[in-house]
Amino acid sequence: MLLLEVISGERLPKPERGKMRVHKINNVNKALDFIASKGVKLVSIGAEEIVDGNAKMTLGMIWTIILRFAIQDISVEETSAKEGLLLWCQRKTAPYKNVNVQNFHISWKDGLAFNALIHRHRPELIEYDKLRKDDPVTNLNNAFEVAEKYLDIPKMLDAEDIVNTARPDEKAIMTYVSSFYHAFSGAQKAETAANRICKVLAVNQENEHLMEDYERLASDLLEWIRRTIPWLEDRVPQKTIQEMQQKLEDFRDYRRVHKPPKVQEKCQLEINFNTLQTKLRLSNRPAFMPSEGKMVSDINNGWQHLEQAEKGYEEWLLNEIRRLERLDHLAEKFRQKASIHEAWTDGKEAMLKHRDYETATLSDIKALIRKHEAFESDLAAHQDRVEQIAAIAQELNELDYYDSHNVNTRCQKICDQWDALGSLTHSRREALEKTEKQLETIDQLHLEYAKRAAPFNNWMESAMEDLQDMFIVHTIEEIEGLISAHDQFKSTLPDADREREAILAIHKEAQRIAESNHIKLSGSNPYTTVTPQIINSKWEKVQQLVPKRDHALLEEQSKQQSNEHLRRQFASQANIVGPWIQTKMEEIGRISIEMNGTLEDQLSHLKQYERSIVDYKPSLDLLEQQHQLIQEALIFDNKHTNYTMEHIRVGWEQLLTTIARTINEVENQILTRDAKGISQEQMQEFRASFNHFDKDHGGALGPEEFKACLISLGYDVENDRQGDAEFNRIMSVVDPNHSGLVTFQAFIDFMSRETTDTDTADQVIASFKVLAGDKNFITAEELRRELPPDQAEYCIARMAPYQGPDAVPGALDYKSFSTALYGESDL
């Protein structure tokens, strides 16, 4: 009856002697009704059993009451009361040696667990290091006495009973241990609050480190781009092929050595940025905004500018090499023709100025006239060479030849001399014609010889010039054209030889007539300086140059055949690598859309796919080696393939970047799923909904596609005022930059926020308030006592002074600090 009065809180009337049983039953029923009103379910027990002294029933009821009022309210990490109490004990005693709490019976027999609980919360009450495991009675009595004296926990257990029992009573131990839990619950709340703050601060510190790393990497990459672009935009041509080829080699080193690591840095920077933004969203923090000029878009713009400068640089180098090669060829051709012309004109001015006709005989005058006519014929024949020299000089000027000044000077001298020769020739003809009436004797044979010998001599000089002329070709067809032209020239040699013999026959006939008529000749033809010896000498020279020309053409033909082999070799490999890269790009696009299996399976499959791509790198290296051989051979085109090395490089870089981004997307999805507790089925449902409306498989949804997707998931965003307002709110969350596109990662972040819960600023403020003892401010001393040193100092350095009316010296404002952590105010 006393127990029931305690439970119900009412004073029950004492029954009279005659009515003892009825009154007892009434009193017990009142207590049982009170117990039932508190939510305690009593099964198969009534007032009669208790009044009649049923010990088993009475003890069962008492245990049920203990469970309801002493143990049921205990909860640790959403576990049941018993499991929560056991988990609490395990955590509190974990640091203590010889203590291993696994149950509520034999784990407590040696008494160390009770002492460990007291020492953990009140270390000044227990000298734990002096306790011995082999003295359980002393250990138990020590814990029971300290608990009763200092913690107001009554001594419910007997040490000897516990030690002498093989398995102590579990319910008794649980009841006694629950008293410790309630006694130390206040300390538990402070610890929970401190843990929450530590967790939030740890996330914030890690995010700040990631932001600093991004800023540093972005600065380095942008600085490298800033230094490289002026170098690629430098289009100042060099004077020689060797200097331009050195620039080409420097560019190759840039493409092979310097740029690839920067491509990887750029890709890694984008991955780090995306990962950081994902972590910020998952921890309910504001999005990271890099410093001005260091956004991912700024880096992409700089990179695009770099590639635009790079795109035209190599083409410019090759064009400059071709131009310089053409210039060298033209300059050598100019020097050769100029030298031949200058050699021909040597002494011509003196000859034309000579007044030998004034003292000559009639026959001499006739001879001088004929000789002058032959000279005019020779002069006319040289007109083409002078025009060629002027045309070559003009072309060298148009191509900006570095030594144009000397070329122009020499060309001007030749032109001036040519004009002078024309004027002198005209003057001499007039002088000779004045005495032409006195000329009666004409040596027809000498004249005919001179007229035929001069063009033939000019033909031989042109032939020698052509046979020694430099040539430059780039294809098999071009060299075969030169060989064909040379063969055609050789076919004219028999006719030329007959012309030579006919000219020599004229000379022999003149000598025969002179001898038969006793005419004394001066030993040379008065009408020409081209003697039979000169004709024979030059003819012999032509005969020697022909086989040399044959050899040079055959060597060039062999070279072009080798170049053709290099073209076909490169084309064969490029026609394999190019389609392979395209196929892999399409397969990655298909994988990123289909996403079969779990995210871990997808990640494993993508990484395996990435390794297979990296393993293909030797094929690209082989193609680079073949491309280098082609460039060293100065091969500028290849009709056997549509792929260039630049196309292959760009495709390879895009392939590596695409697979890395796809892997990062799946990793971020895993991070989101684990952090938000999204199931695999939910993730697959989100992916299926997203893919269904992503009609072009571009990996992003437009506003109308995204609205249709939301409607399919049950969101009320129909085309009315309320629906439009809700849709605009959602778009501001998933597309804060107003790009007009919603990525799958933004879609997942939104759905995870809609379906899960995260830490909030109010929760952090409540945790700080616990540590501050319900004050509106907190002190540095309290922070250092409750938090780890580094995180305590982190808070102290960033908290603003508290300005409220209840402020004390050193008071810190934890409320503004907490809202700043979540972007609701400035830190």
Image (cartoon, rainbow, N blue to C red):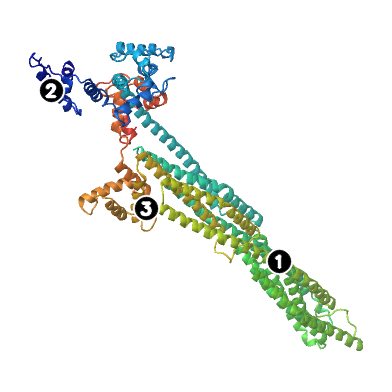
Number of the front mark, 1 or 3: 3
Kind of element beneath mark 3: strand
**Could you tell which of marks 2 and 1 lies nearer the N-terminus?**
2
Number of the front mark, 3 or 2: 2
Q: Amino acid at mark 3?
A: Ala
Residue that carries the numbered disc 3 in the rendered image: 700
Pinpoint residue 412: horizontal percent, then vertical percent. Answer: 67, 66
Q: Quadrant location of residue 483?
A: bottom right
Pinpoint residue 727: horizontal percent, then vertical percent. Answer: 26, 49
- Residue at position x 9%, y 15% from top? 15
Calculate the distance from the C-alpha at mark 1 to the C-alpha at mark 3. 56 Å
> Relative to residue 136, is residue 645 drawn left or right?
right
Residue that carries the numbered disc 1 in the rendered image: 558
Pinpoint residue 673: horizontal percent, then vertical percent. Answer: 37, 42
Q: Is residue 609 above or below residue 161?
A: below
How many residues crowd mark 3 within 10 Å: few (<14), some (14–19), many (20+)? many
How many residues crowd mark 2 within 10 Å: few (<14), some (14–19), many (20+)? some
> Relative to residue 424, is residue 310 drawn left or right?
left
Residue that carries the numbered disc 2 in the rendered image: 30
- Residue at position x 59%, y 55% from top? 619
Pinpoint residue 12: horizontal percent, then vertical percent. Answer: 11, 17
Q: Amino acid at mark 1?
A: Ser
